[in-house]
Image (spheres, rainbow, N blue to C red):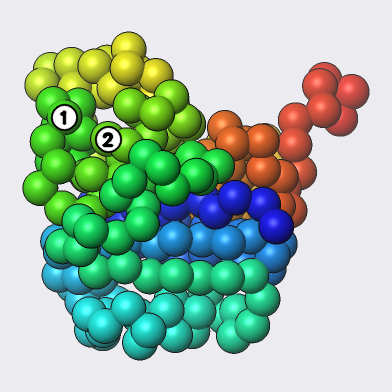
């Protein structure tokens, strides 16, 4: 069994990115440790009109339902304040962590080494252990403070994958645009589990 991947879900808009990541990872049979920040619960309700259950077991069922993957893979959800969870320790081996979507507040706290909740602590652990940390910021426009915090993360070894879709794969739906970003984020971990028409060079152009 491969080592688990941590998926952090912050309070940025665009929680569909997390839903699609859960879908593709579970269908491919990966183990996912998911931690959603406290703010993400409020954003989910604002964007989707439903409530995310706080209990880990019920939350797992909720994410599977949203991702339309009732079976497959392993999904373990953690309470946002449970800083004693396994993913809070460097001795817990992982493939790395993706924070998607990532708010500028979360970017700032990770960049400054603050660990006020489990998501931030898990991200800090990836950096200190030299493991991959992929941050998918979803904000516009970016202030100088945002840019400096993102630069600090990049200098610390994190990979920055902005939620910016492409059009060369001929997207037909919003889901196609979302999946492009999810695929590029997972690429940073060497995971290729999102069906995607990748760029093949000028030969395909007419």
Q: In this orientation, which residue lies closer to the viewer: 35 or 64?
A: 35
The numbered disc on residue 146 is: none
Q: Nearer the viewer, residue 81 or 193?
A: 81
Circles 2 and 1: CB atoms closer than 8 Å? yes
Location of residue 113 (image quadrant): top left
**Left or right placement of residue 166 versus residue 129 in this view:** right
The percent position of residue 99, horizontal first and vertical second, equals 36, 45
Q: Which residue is mark 2?
A: 124
Q: Position of residue 122 (x, y in %)?
A: 31, 45
Quarter of the figure with residue 49: bottom left
Q: Is residue 46 above or below residue 146?
A: below
Q: Position of residue 170 (x, y in %)?
A: 69, 46
Residue placed at 59% from the left, 85% from the top? 70
Q: Which residue is mark 1?
A: 113
Label 1 element class: loop
Residue in the image at 82% along x and 20% along y: 202
Query: In this image, 52 relative to 198: left or right?
Result: left
Q: In terms of sequence position, does the residue under pointer 2 or pointer 1 come before the other?
A: 1
Q: Nearer the viewer, residue 66 or 46?
A: 66
The x and y percentages for residue 98 are: 43, 44
Q: Quadrant of residue 190?
A: top right
Q: How many marks?
A: 2
Give the SS element for disc 2: helix
Q: Where 79 sits versus 177, above or below? A: below
Which residue is pictured at 15% across the width and 62% down the height? 81
Query: What residue is drawn where x is 64% and y is 60%?
Result: 30
């Amino acid at each position: 069994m491969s080592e688990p991947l941590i998926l952090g879900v912050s309070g940025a808009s665009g929680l569909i990115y997390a839903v699609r990541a859960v879908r593709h990872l579970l269908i491919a049979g990966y183990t996912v440790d998911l931690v959603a920040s406290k703010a993400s619960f409020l954003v989910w309700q604002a964007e989707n009109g439903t409530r995310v259950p706080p209990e880990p077991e019920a939350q797992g069922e909720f994410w599977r339902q949203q991702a339309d993957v009732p079976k497959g893979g392993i999904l373990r959800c953690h309470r946002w304040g449970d800083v004693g969870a396994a993913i809070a320790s460097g001795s817990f081996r992982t493939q790395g962590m993706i924070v998607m979507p990532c708010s500028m507040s979360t970017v700032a706290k990770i960049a400054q080494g603050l660990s006020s909740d489990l998501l931030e602590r898990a991200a800090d652990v990836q950096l200190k252990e030299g493991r991959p940390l992929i941050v998918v910021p979803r904000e516009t426009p970016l202030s100088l403070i945002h840019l400096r915090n993102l630069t600090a993360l990049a200098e610390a070894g994190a990979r920055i994958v902005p939620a910016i879709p492409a059009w060369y794969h001929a997207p037909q739906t919003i889901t196609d645009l979302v999946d492009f970003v999810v695929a590029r984020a997972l690429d940073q971990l060497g995971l290729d589990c999102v069906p995607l028409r990748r760029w093949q060079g000028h030969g395909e152009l007419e």
